[in-house]
Image (tube, helix red, strand yellow):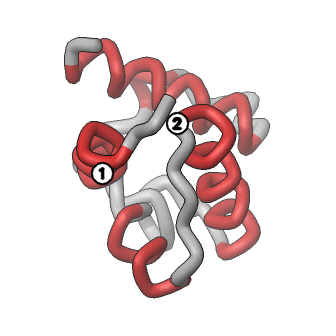
């Protein structure tokens, strides 16, 4: 899948998995931090994103430190998905 299409798909999945009813895919910038002052996600959301990666892309993250490196923004998630996806 082309990177731009994958980014759009991931943004839709983030919105769906986290039930962000007021957010549209185009509201999430590729380099916008997902946590803190960026999108404003919290630690519970990070668990949901890890579950999303496992369910949708077959990527299992066991180490929380690795998760923090991956769940920075859409760009870092996409790079990791493209390198490690099994589905």
Picture quadrant where residue 42 is located = bottom right
Cα distance between the residues tagged 1 and 2: 10 Å
User: Residue 83 location, x and y as percent?
Assistant: 25, 46
Residue at the spot 51% in from the left edge and 50% down from the top edge: 59
User: Residue 3 location, x and y as percent?
Assistant: 21, 22
Image: 52 above or below 62: above
User: Residue 12 location, x and y as percent?
Assistant: 56, 23
In the rendered structure, which disc, 1 or 2, sits on the residue that comes first in sequence? 2
Task: Say which residue label 2 marks.
Answer: 57
Q: Is residue 30 visible?
A: no
Residue at the spot 69% in from the left edge and 61% down from the top edge: 45
Which one is in front, 64 or 26? Answer: 64
Residue at the spot 52% in from the left edge and 82% down from the top edge: 63
Residue at the spot 45% in from the left edge and 37% down from the top edge: 86
Image: 35 above or below 81: below
Q: Could you tell me how many numbered marks the image carries?
A: 2
Task: Say which residue label 1 marks.
Answer: 80
User: Residue 78 location, x and y as percent?
Assistant: 30, 41
Local SS, label 1: helix
| Residue at the far front in the pictured view | 86
Dot 1 surroundings within 10 Å: few (below 14), some, or many (20 or more)?
A: some
């Amino acid at each position: 899948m082309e990177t731009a299409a994958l980014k759009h798909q991931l943004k839709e999945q983030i919105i769906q998995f986290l039930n962000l009813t007021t957010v549209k895919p185009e509201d999430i910038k590729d380099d916008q931090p997902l946590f803190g002052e960026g999108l404003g996600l919290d630690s519970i959301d990070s668990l949901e994103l890890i579950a999303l990666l496992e369910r949708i892309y077959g990527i299992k993250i066991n180490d929380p430190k690795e998760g923090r490196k991956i769940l920075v923004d859409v760009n870092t998630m996409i790079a990791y998905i493209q390198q490690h996806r099994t589905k």
